[in-house]
Each structure stands twice: as C-alpha cells, then as structure tokens.
Amino acid sequence: MPAPQAPPTIAIVAAHGQGLFEFGCAVGLFAPIRPELDVPWYTTQLCAAEPGALRMLGSTQVQLPHGLEALDHADTIIVPGWRDPSERPPQPLLDALTRAHRRGARIASICSGAFVLAWAGLLDGRSATTHWRLTETLAREFPAITVREDVLYVDTGTVITSAGSATGMDMMLHLVRKDYGAHVANRVAERLVLAPWRDAERSQRVVRSIPNGEPTRLARLMEWIRRNLREEHSLRSLSEHASLSQRTLQRQFLEATGLSPIDWLIRERVAFARELLETTDRPLHWVAEQAGFGSQESFRRHFRGQTELSPTTYREQHRGSTNAYALTGC
C-alpha cells in the first residue's frame, strides 16, 4: 500500500487525573520510530489539556511538551480517557476539538474519553461507544448519541470511539490499517505482540471462563487454521482436528472470540485476502484461492460483507498513487 506522502501528525491529549494505561497505549503505539516499516511513520505530539505538570493516576506528575495549540495542526487527535464523566472538560479543550473537527481532523477516544467528545458535541447524531460500565451513563446524559453498548469500537469516519482500556489498541491498529494498510498494521501488531485484528462488532463482554486445558487446544487449532486457510474446512472437520465435539467447539469459539468457528474462519480469510490485495498484483482468482474461498463469487460476497468494498475497489484504493492518508476522508 502506498504510504502517506508526509507523515501524518498524531496529537495525544492528556489532562489531570489521566489514566496512565490508556495514555501509555497511545504513546507506545504511535510515538516510537519504526524504521523497519519503511514508511513515513506518524509524527506524534503529546499535549496537555491543562496548564502545568499533569497529576495523573498513581500520584504521578508528567510534563508534556505541547499544549492545545498542537491540536490546530494535527491530522488525528487521540483522547485516551477522562477523569470524571460527570465533569465538563475545560472549555479550551472543547473549543480545540471543535475547531479540529470543523477543519476535518480525525478524532478518536479511548474508554471514558468518549465523554470529552460528547461534551464537545462531536457525537451528536452519531453512533458511539465507551466502556460497558459507562454506556448507560453516556446514553442518559447525552440522548442525541446512539450509544452502542456491546462493541469494541465505532468508526463513523472522522470520529471514532472505543470501549474499555485495552480495546483502544484495537481501535488504534484500525487507524493504522486505514492509513497504511493491513500489511503495516500486522507488522506493528506483531512488534507489540498483539492480535493483528479483532472485529469491531465483537462483544465487550465475551465469557472467558474456559475449562482447564482447552485454551491451549483452541489456540493450537486457531494457529493451524491460519496456516491452512487454503484448505476446505467445516465445523465437523475442525472439531475432529481439535478432538472436540461440534457443540463444545462452537461454545469454546463463542466464549473466546464472540464468533462461531465458521464466522471466525471467514474473517481470517478476508483479513489475509486484504493483505494479498495490498502486497501483490496477482489476479483475484489467485487471491481467492490462497485465502481459501471456494469461488470468486464467494470471495466477493464475503469480502464486501467485511469491508463494504469489492476486492477490485479495495485494491485500487490501497495500491494506487493517491495519498493513502487522504483515503480515510480526514
């Protein structure tokens, strides 16, 4: 995929009472120099929403190099949380976010950061999410927002909201995927030892109480499937390979991923096909075969269902000469 012509600028905004985990996740993903990717990686600016050294959780004090003025030039702004959903954020912060949104900047939040976007009016008339413990409060306090209670993140174009703390990583990898393509996003995920892609529609509260011994069995099955996507698979063949009953396999997949085995398999095949479309010029029938789709018709149907684009259009957008960052609509 062609990289952006100039490194996009990411502004990460913090305030007093900021959670270090969410802030650290954003810094850890965007701030490091990544020469191994061979793309003009993001320029990251850490911005204080309030004057002076910020008193973060754990009695930590942090002095950030930039103030809110940096938001006036950022391509993407990350708001990694807010100290109190019932507290209106400082007006200068709300004004800076509003100006950035009006000029077309992309604004994303992690967890309770959705309340900052809500106070700024950026979520009115949009779908949004936040941590499952806060969705009821968000819906009650801001009725103009369509709150989605059980998804990992919601992308409405220039405004993206994500759920609880760790799902911010899924959302930010999603941003990398939009800007640089699946291949670069997968390499970043590998460097951070993260799952390269989790579906945004996955439930925030999947059951994780899997009986002893079966997580390893399920993980081995998943890894085997990824290595053998070209093969024909069915619920019966997968259950036989894992030495589990079909009912048990269905239950374990749902508990671990929020998906049935076949739905998970389709998403893995589409994810692999996306990378092939970005990194090769091979014909569509070859891509369909490598990803394990039985026919080009099946490939096109499932691919469009996952990406809302045809394989041909996806390839044109991600391998053309157009500035890749402009393709995000930001």
Image: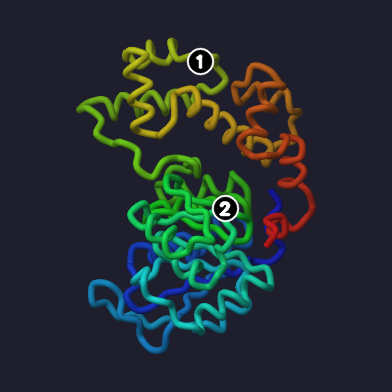
Q: Secondary structure at mark 2?
A: strand
Q: Position of residue 242 (x, y in %)?
A: 35, 17
Residue at 62%, 52% in the rendered image: 178
Calculate the distance from the C-alpha at mark 2 to the C-alpha at mark 1: 32 Å
Q: Residues within 10 Å of mark 2 (few under 14, many from 20)?
A: some
Residue 75 in the image: above or below residue 308? below
Q: Give x and y (percent) for residue 165.
A: 37, 57
Image-based side of 123 in relation to 288, left or right: left
Q: Residue 235 lies in what quarter of the image?
A: top left
* 183 versus 214 height, above or below: below
164 sits to left or right of 281: left
Name the residue beneath numbered marker 1. 233
Residue reaching furthest to the left? 212
Q: Which mark is residue 155?
A: 2
Vertical relation: 233 (above or below) 82: above
**Which mark sits nearer the N-terminus, 2 or 1?**
2
The quadrant of the rendering that contains the C terminus is bottom right
